[in-house]
Each structure stands twice: as C-alpha cells, then as structure tokens.
Amino acid sequence: MTATAVTDLILSHFRSHRRTRIEADARPVALFGPNGAGKTNILEGVSLLSPGRGLRRAGADELIRRPEALGWKVTAVVQAPKIVHEVETEAQPEQTRQVRIDGKAQPQVALAEVARIVWLIPAMDRLWIEGADGRRRFLDRIAMSFMPSHAQAVLTYEKAMRERNRLLKDMVRDAHWYTALERQMAEAGAAITLNRHAALARLAQAQDGARTAFPAAALELVHPESELPFDEAALAAALEAGRAADLRAGRTLIGPHRVDLAAVYIDKGVAAAQCSTGEQKALLISLVLANARALAEDTGTPPLILLDEVAAHLDAGRRAALYDEICALGAQAWLTGTGPELFEDLGDRAQHVAVSDESGESRVEQKPNMWRSP
C-alpha cells in the first residue's frame, strides 16, 4: 500500500520559522528538540494542507512570523499513489488565507481531495471532560476525512445558522425571513448528521477485531433536546416548530450544532470522562489509529498522521506499540518529542530531524542514519 506523503515542505515566515525546508520520503518523520524550538509549528504547517484553520485553529494573522510581520507561506509537494501535487497556502497581513493546487487557485475545501490528514495534539487531552464544541470538531474532522464534502456541508450550515441567529436576536417574527435559511440549514444539517453517523459506524468497524495495544471506545451522538432528525424535511419542520423557543433564547436550540459525542471505554464499561488521564489519552490514540486504518482500507492509502508530543505521555511498551502500528499501516506520521531517545524504537524506520532555536529563529537539521549501526 502506497502512503500519501509530504516529500518536500517549505515554511516561509511562518510562526518561528523564517525559512525552513524538510525533504522527506514516505517514512515517519520524527522531530525532536527542546520546548519552544518550533516543532509544533512544523506540524501546524503540515496541518494547513487540509481545509480549516489547522491543528491550533489559528487565524491567518496569528501565523505571521514576528517582528517582520510579512506574509507567511507553506509550500509542499504531496505524493499520492497515482499523482503528485504541489500545494501552496499563504496569507498576507490582514488578508484571508489563499490556496493554490498545482498552480491554480482553489477553495480550501479542495485540499481534502489532495491529502487526508488526522492529528492528535496535547490540547485535545481534555477532550472528554471539556465542552462539547471540541468533541464536535473532533468528530467533524473524522467525518471530513471519510467524506470531503462534509467540510462544505458544515460551512453551509454554520453560515445559514449565523444569519438565522441574527434574526432571532433582532426579534424578527416575519416567517418568510426564516424559510430560506431553514431550508439551507435542513439540507446541510441532514447531510452533517448522516455523515457523522456514517463516520462513527466506520470507526466502530475499524476498531472491531483490530490487533492494537490501545483500548477501543464506543461512540454515540447525543442531542440535548431530543433525537436529531436525519431527514431533511423533518429537520426543516423541527426548525420551524422551534422558532418561538428560539426567539426567547435568542439562538437556534435544535440542530447538529447542539450534538455532543459520548464515549465509553468498552472493556471497562466506563465513560471516557470518568477514565484516568492516561486512559483518556489512550482512547484518543486508539480513535486516531482507527480513523487511519479505515481510511487506508477505503482509499487504498493511509493518511498523513500528525502526533504532537504523544511519545512523552506513553510508557515504553505503548510507545513501541504505537510506532509498530504506524509502520505496519505504512503511514507517513509526523511526530514531535523533546529528545531523540523518544524515537529510538523507530530506528531507521523513520527520518529524524533536530529542531533548535537560534535567537528566536527555528532551525532544522536532518539526521540521516541516526539509529543505524556503524
């Protein structure tokens, strides 16, 4: 199975990187160096090869290197099984992010057709115990990895909902102002709901019977008001019927934007929110790996996997098991850690890159043959 891989990555005036270039093959890429050296910034650059705001959800101006405050740019050669793409994404100060694929301007959603990317970062460690917003974003990224059109459905729904909420806050009662917006929300919302359920079913299949060192999770969608309709007409009717309550609340109270993702550690029968910190992390890793396995089966190529500081939170046995699973999958994973010893078990199955900070500027040094015997 041929992996999707970033074989050439250039970061220009991006975060702490004035100009950084990493040339790679399809093996995992292990980035090591002290905290603050700029390792996560490299992963963030790779994450922008997919639609959205990247793994930190940063605005375009937040990515600008200071103090120069010039426009930033990420350029990558993405090797897929049957085609090679050159992807450029950039933004000038106070302007929106632009995307070019093979030299042609494209909307961000087109990136989903170039590379499937899954990731896990330390900010997600509290996913099961914090607000539902983060869990919905986590689920929507999974759904988008299986069905790239999911990204457009989410954008359409959120835009229409913002307009409807504005009418509600302004106490507009004329029904004809709501009809077209609710029709858009119902069409996109039904697609979102179907995609989310399909993604959960696919994850369950990928976890079932998988030989893995990580625990399986049972996932379920929960809506605070009632069961969310799958059908477009039923959702439109529910939105119309809910206008009075929504006017009192000043916002839309029913829809896929209100859904939560519940998880249970299957072997223990314990809700993820009640699990230990280590168990919660293991469940997240399990889901990311299941997502990657399912994508590999469905598309014939494993996705790019971004794992930020994941090795530091695993014991030696699970760390080795994680590396073995990534390599068995054949995925190009980009991993970060503070020291090279965290990646010793990968050996020459990976490429090793040292990242350092020199007077506020990130530098990289590729380390070929780092773990090979003389």
Image (cartoon, rainbow, N blue to C red):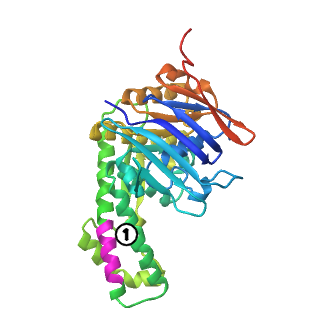
Which of the 4 quarters of the picture holds residue 363? top right
In percent of width and height, residue 235 lies at: 29, 72
Which region shows up in magenta? 178-189
Task: Using the rendered view, name the quadrant where residue 361 is placed.
Answer: top right
Disc 1 on helix, strand or loop? Answer: loop
Closer to the camera in the image, 179 or 325: 179
Question: Is 212 situated above or below 186?
Answer: above
* Residue extending farthest top: 374
Provide residue 193's location: percent of width, then percent of height. Answer: 32, 61
**Residue depicted at 50% across the width and 44% down the height:** 75
Q: Is residue 181 magenta?
A: yes
Q: Is residue 24 left or right of residue 259?
A: right
Instruction: Please name the residue shown 33% across and 61% down the image.
Output: 192
Which quadrant holds the C terminus?
A: top right
Q: Position of residue 148 (x, y in %)?
A: 34, 53
- Point out residue 158 in the picture as x, y percentages from the top left corner: 42, 68
Q: Is residue 126 above or below residue 153?
A: above
Q: Considering only vertical position in the picture, is 95 above or below 348?
A: below
> Which residue was labeled with disc 1?
255
Quarter of the view holding residue 278: top right
- Magenta portion: prevailing SS class: helix
Left or right of residue 194: residue 170: right
Q: Is residue 283 above or below residue 171?
A: above
Q: Nearer the viewer, residue 241 or 148?
A: 148
- One can see residue 267 in this view: no
Q: Which three-letter amino acid code belongs to the residue tagged 1?
A: Gly
The residue closer to the viewer here, 282 or 161, is 161
